[in-house]
Amino acid sequence: MDLRFGDGKPTDEERAAVDALLGPPESSWAGADRGGTDTADLRWARGGREARDRRDQLLPALHALNDRVGWISEGALDYVCRRLTVPPAEAYGVATFYAMFSVRPRPATVLHVCTDLACTAAGADELSAAVAARLGPENGVRIERSPCLGLCERAPAALVIRAGEPSCPTPEGSPAPPAPEGASARPAFEDEAVQAESGGPGAAAPGDGGGTSRSSEAESGGRKGRRGRPILHATAVCAPATPDTAVHAATSPESAPTEPAAHTAAPQTGNPALTPTTPTTPLILLRRIGTTDPTSLDDYRAHGGYTALRRAFALGPAGVIREVTDAGLVGRGGAAFPTGRKWQATSAQPDHPHYLVCNADESEPGTFKDRVLMEGDPYSLVEAMTIAAYATGAHQGHLYLRGEYPRALARITHAVRQARTRGLLGDDVLGQGYAFDIEIRRGAGAYICGEETALFNSIEGHRGEPRSKPPFPVEKGLFGKPTVENNVETLVNVLPILTMGAEAYAAIGTPDSTGPKLFCVSGTVARPGVYELPFGATLGELLALAGVRGNLRAVLLGGAAGGFVRPDELDIPLTFEGTREAGTTLGSGVVMAFDDTVPLPRLLLRIAEFFRDESCGQCVPCRVGTVRQEEALHRIVDRTGTDAAPDIALLREVGRAMRDASICGLGQTAWNAVESAIDRLGAYR
């Protein structure tokens, strides 16, 4: 192991941020002050294997620095490496892997303006230019063009993150204050709560700054704002964003307008007219959103919460797996793998411990259903994770949440803390002698971490690059142990399976695609949002609920990794088998409508840019192919017919190579949308 540390030194503020997470260093080797210490302390490394076992704290440590200072300096990175015994070259590779981190100096406030598909169609480029002009060059705000922020129903969207001192400290053991319904621009207390609950040795209590203050400042520490007050870490969401609201949020995030309540993103809640007229009309997955207080555990239980967990304990692990298998539940993230088979394979592994991982890193452009569930019904996810862990023999769960979801993080952090306080997580769940707890990990802006093995690498403190299979995660997953991984929607579907029974659940939908499905509808529709329909409803029925406009040009199914369909193909059944037969994909449930005012070639170019940016670069077909695809689309953005023919032929060749030889789904699907636009929509004719 090459531990060649640099000459950079951390500031007191950077040191305090890391020590608040990891605890104070125990020796000079780990970065403690050498003054007054025995010189022999530097001749051997304390910790050894124990320190290396904390490698999984690398990503939280980088978040702590980024949250406190706004960027990661060489000295700060060197200090983290000493604390965790991580080679600096490897830590640099991790820090530069994620879009939300910077290893170059930048202002404390960063304004992320979404320029992905729905936001581009809604004028994101004009918004970004207008904000830049209003703020000016010396504004103390960094404006960054961002991939999808998961706010497509309120496009165009922007997210403000201001670095600063931890805010809203709470006493050890007390729950963090919940984010009020509709809250957006609030001090980011959830970051400290996550740190305290990270499970790492020496984790600080929420709000416990630890360490010493910056020597050049007053004793109260860190950077100061007006009137000498410390600058606090804060976030603000602007959606739909205008130049005025974006500038206001960037310059004063703590006083930005509040974000709309979660139920506003689900138009069917409270509106029976938008519920399909079938025998399975009642909402199942969305039924508590808008009717219960997402911050109240008592309200959740009053509306049927934890009924499913009690039935799970009555059935036993094998009985739960049998119910899930008989219900026909398949993964809702796009792969549609049978959930019962995955759980059975994991539970049967003799190697222990087993782990449960909830993939809440929904980064597919156009996807926001998991965000709505976590913001509007967070306790359902906590309960569903507990059931999944019980069935598969896991006692530790990891919830990997994308870093662009501050309110979802606040809600789910509060829900975990409340469940732990009330005996619904911990050493004796519901008095049944079963131990289970949940650790929350934030992503940092990497689409590839939605791939399960890349997600495992990210949690473990490595670059989020996919692993070769086999071995499969059910054999060797997180930390090399048997792991079951499901996304938020898949897990939440387990609750109605246990409360209504497998047979009743399987009666919803079609024989091959059972149960309800959530669809994320955005673009040129009157009522964008998350819709719940039984499998088997048609694309036309869904768009009718959302209020599609008359000048429809195309519909993108499955997001950037999906495919386009024409306006005369709206009778496609929304099932996995139905979309397959139609030559497209259902994916995670993205439905983006575009009218004839949206320039299709520039939309395809944005998709190509997205895949170029998000490729992890591990395999040549994807690393080179996504670049060549973007270059070709740049050349033909204003061409048609014979002028575009040579580059279209090149695109087909590059697309086949990526599809056949890429190591993971990113490269394998990077050509799908472009291919479908050329073949189905006649782009460039």
Image (cartoon, rainbow, N blue to C red):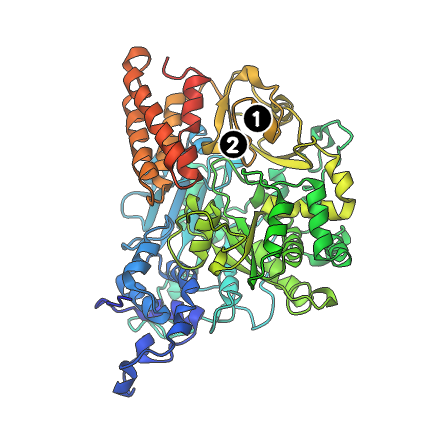
Q: Can you tell which mark lies on residue 558?
A: 2
The earlier-in-sequence mark between 2 and 1 is 2
Circle 1 Cα neighbour tier, 10 Å, few/some/many (<14 / 14–19 / ≥20):
some
Nearest the camera: 619 or 498? 619
Residue 685 in the image, given as x and y percentages of width and height: 37, 12
Q: Secondary structure at mark 1?
A: helix
Q: Can you tell which mark lies on residue 59?
A: none
Left of 269 or right of it: where is 39? Answer: left
Q: Is residue 3 above or below residue 334?
A: below
Mark 2 against mark 1, which lies toward the viewer? 1
Residue 407 in the image, given as x and y percentages of width and height: 54, 51
Which residue is disc 1 drawn over?
A: 579
Residues under numbered marks 2 and 1 in contact, where contact means CB atoms less than 8 Å apart: yes
Nearest the camera: 93 or 44? 44
Q: Secondary structure at mark 2?
A: loop
Residue 587 in the image, given as x and y percentages of width and height: 53, 34
Give the quadrant of residue 221. bottom left
Q: Is residue 316 above or below residue 580?
A: below
Left of 661 or right of it: where is 511? Answer: right
- Amino acid carrying mark 2 in the image: Gly
